[in-house]
């Protein structure tokens, strides 16, 4: 039997709506614009440099090394706060020693209500920086707080208690660094993820242009 024109119109409308939903979701998830609400814009390079400089002026060598590493890892991996706090020392060691996927850090995230994992290629220098922190500053702090036998192996820990850092604590660290550095613009941890995305998109565009010129 022949389908009525109203049925075909409804199907067309449904496809249009689904298409728009997919498009909007892709834009929000993978390519945040500079003018998104909230913390949608990438962190400025001057602000990033100021944050890194402020870490060196911490009240202790441990805090200086830990806070600098938090910034380096989040920038290098494009990780969210909720993906950064669960990182464990074994994740760093595995990334350095894995010959199958070298320098790939495994991140866990809750997405759509489910625990998922992904591997992210990050610079070896960042992993080596993390390994040095694990072997020295972190190891010493664990011994002085909860003790080696009670080590939970989370990478980022509290200086006072040795407990794993929460996502809110990471936000507070950025806030304190921002104030200490006198940064006027926004300097929120999620903006490092947006900077990571824009930097890699720029690299992709450059590569595609290079390939295009080679075939002219």
Image (cartoon, rainbow, N blue to C red):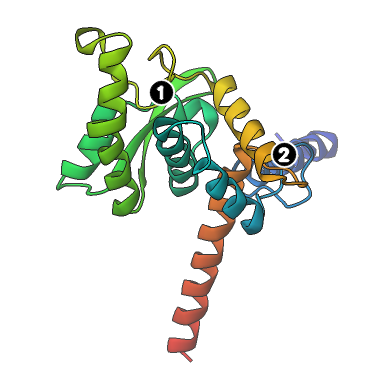
Relative depth, front residue between 8 and 209? 209
Residue 152 showing in the rendered view: no
Which residue is denoted by mark 2 in the rendering? 39
Quick check: 39 left or right of 88?
right
Relative depth, front residue between 69 and 17? 69
Mark sitting earlier along the chain (2/1): 2
| Mark identifier at residue 131 | none
Residue positioned most to the bottom: 216
Q: Secondary structure at mark 2?
A: loop
Q: How many residues crowd mark 1 within 10 Å: few (<14), some (14–19), many (20+)?
A: many
Location of residue 60 with respect to 42 vertically, above or below: above
Q: Quadrant of residue 178?
A: top right
Relative depth, front residue between 178 and 97? 178
Q: Residue at x 22, y 49 (%)?
A: 102
Q: x%, y% of residue 130?
A: 32, 39
Residue 157 showing in the rendered view: yes
Location of residue 152 with respect to 137 vertically, above or below: above
Q: Quadrant of residue 146?
A: top left
Across the whole image, how many numbered discs are drawn on residues?
2
Q: x%, y% of residue 74?
A: 48, 41
Which residue is denoted by mark 1 in the rendering? 86
Q: Residue at x 41, y 23 (%)?
A: 86
Q: Quadrant of residue 164?
A: top left
Q: Residue at x 25, y 10 (%)?
A: 147
């Amino acid at each position: 039997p022949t389908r009525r024109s109203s049925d075909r119109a409804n199907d067309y409308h449904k496809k249009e709506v689904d298409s728009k939903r997919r498009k909007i979701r892709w834009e929000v998830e993978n390519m945040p614009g500079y003018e998104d609400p909230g913390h949608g814009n990438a962190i400025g390079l001057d602000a990033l440099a100021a944050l890194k400089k402020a870490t060196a002026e911490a009240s202790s060598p441990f805090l200086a090394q830990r806070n600098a590493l938090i910034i380096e890892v989040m920038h290098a991996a494009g990780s969210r706060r909720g993906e950064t706090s669960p990182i464990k020392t074994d994740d760093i060691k595995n990334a350095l020693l894995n010959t199958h996927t070298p320098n790939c850090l495994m991140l866990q995230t809750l997405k759509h209500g489910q625990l998922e994992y992904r591997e992210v290629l990050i610079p070896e220098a960042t992993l080596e920086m993390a390994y040095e922190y694990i072997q020295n500053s972190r190891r010493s702090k664990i011994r002085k707080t909860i003790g080696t036998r009670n080590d939970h192996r989370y990478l980022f820990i509290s200086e006072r208690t040795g407990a794993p850092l929460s996502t809110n604590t990471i936000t507070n660290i950025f806030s304190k660094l921002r104030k200490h550095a006198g940064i006027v613009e926004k300097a929120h941890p999620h903006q490092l993820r947006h900077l990571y995305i824009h930097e890699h998109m720029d690299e992709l565009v450059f590569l595609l242009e290079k390939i295009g010129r080679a075939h002219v």
